[in-house]
Image (cartoon, helix red, strand yellow):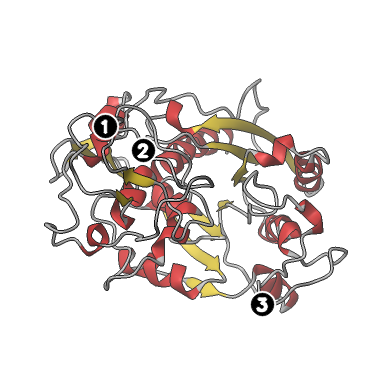
Amino acid sequence: MTEIVRKEIKVLSLFTGIGGLDTGFVGKVIAHKDSIINKEFVENDYNIDGFVQLKQHNFVSVFQNDILEGAKEIYNYNNDKSNYITDSIYNLISKNFIFPDTDIVIGGFPCQDFSHSGKREGFKSTKSHDLKEETSSKKENNRGTLYKSFVEVVKKVKPKLFVAENVYGLITMKSEPIKQIVKDFSDVGYDVTYQIVNCSDFGIPQTRKRVIIIGISRERKKDIDENWNCITKNKIQCPLGKYFNHLEEPSNTTDISQMVYSRAKRLEKGQGQKEINLLTFSPTMRAEHHGNIEFRRHKNSNTNVGEKDMEERRLTVREAGLIQTFPPDYIFSKKKNMVAYKYIGNAVPPLLGYLIADKIKELYNSHF
């Protein structure tokens, strides 16, 4: 019998960060078995009790981009083949950079200016596109308008499909930036729509609402159906404790990422002062995480039964990564530091990336 060879689908990644979305498309996705209801996704059991490795999709990465050298460093710890360029995407376009041919463009354009956790300046952000200086809110190259560079890349490389991920705040701002973003992508030759996804409904142990924008080329072979963009597979909930069962306490582990956690004292109010509940879901891992990441447990805890006499501490880097469904052995650092907190909070959960990739593969195969 003739072996069927699957065509590799090329992916170009923007705003790559440490590779959460990329891992879902081209990497090794590891999840707790209770996070996966679609058993056809499972390749085999993983070498950590309770975890499974998912079947790898037939995507191949041709380009990655971000402005942060630290994000690139973490990405490269975990990916052998990297074409990662650290420069503002706005600068690359201005320099007439030649992007590689691709089938799919993916990326989570900067969310801070739309997030409920920030100032919500939107398109009038005073942060420059490269974060090097404050800028005028009237400038077209500020952080809040970087999605336009995403649009420009789509216009240049003409992918069959693209995916843009961002915060729920795109929908709730009075100025309704989502309408302008959809229009701008539509104007370069795509049918575009979006879905609001709550990660906790898809096996991710975190209450994290995100907007998933998908565009499909109007040069496809057949027309699209109603709700053509919607991710519907793997509707299951998994409590956070499942992801932590295998972990040792920081004082007992040899895992550098599990050794490291913020020593910031507990305050009376403000973000990050609550303890997580192992029987339900974590709060959203935030992009501005630093010292104020949530507590793993409070002293004399009544939330997590059996832990009231254990040490009060905040979440470790490893725990933050697991909440985001990064593989339990993902390398965040090779020395003891907390810098990965913000990169983890800014990432797309790899399991969500995997489900998005599954939808994109389905659309690619059926329409092209």
SS for callout 3:
loop
Badge nearest the viewer, 1 or 3: 1
Q: In this view of the protein, which residue sits in the foreground, 232 or 111?
A: 111
Where in the figure is residue 266, as x and y percent of width and height?
A: 41, 51
Where disc 2 sits, the SS reads loop
Position of 236 compared to 122: left or right? left
Q: Position of residue 228 (x, y in %)?
A: 61, 26
**Is residue 59 rendered to the left or right of residue 34?**
right
Task: Give the residue drawn at x 52%, y 74%.
Answer: 85
Residue at the spot of label 3? 132
Rendered position, 105 above or below 78? above
Residue that extends furthest to the right in the rendered view of this protein: 138
User: Which of pointers 1 and 3 lies earlier in the amino acid sequence?
Assistant: 3
Residue name at image x 79 percent, y 54 percent: 123
How packed mark 2 is, by other alpha carbons closer than 10 Å (few <14, some 14-19, many 20 or more), is many
Q: Position of residue 231 (x, y in %)?
A: 51, 29
Say if 367 sits above or below 254 in the image.
above
In the image, what residue type sits under mark 1?
A: Asn
Q: Which mark is residue 276?
A: 2
Q: Residues within 10 Å of mark 3 (few under 14, many from 20)?
A: few
For badge 2, the amino acid type reads Ile
Q: Is residue 321 above or below residue 45?
A: below
Residue at 26% x, 38% y is 300
Q: For the residue carrying disc 1, how many other residues have a C-alpha within 10 Å: few (<14), some (14-19), or many (20+)?
A: some
SS of the residue at dot 1?
A: loop
Q: Which residue is mark 1?
A: 304
The disc at residue 158 is none
- Inter-mark Cα distance, 1 to 3: 43 Å
Q: Amino acid at mark 3?
A: Lys
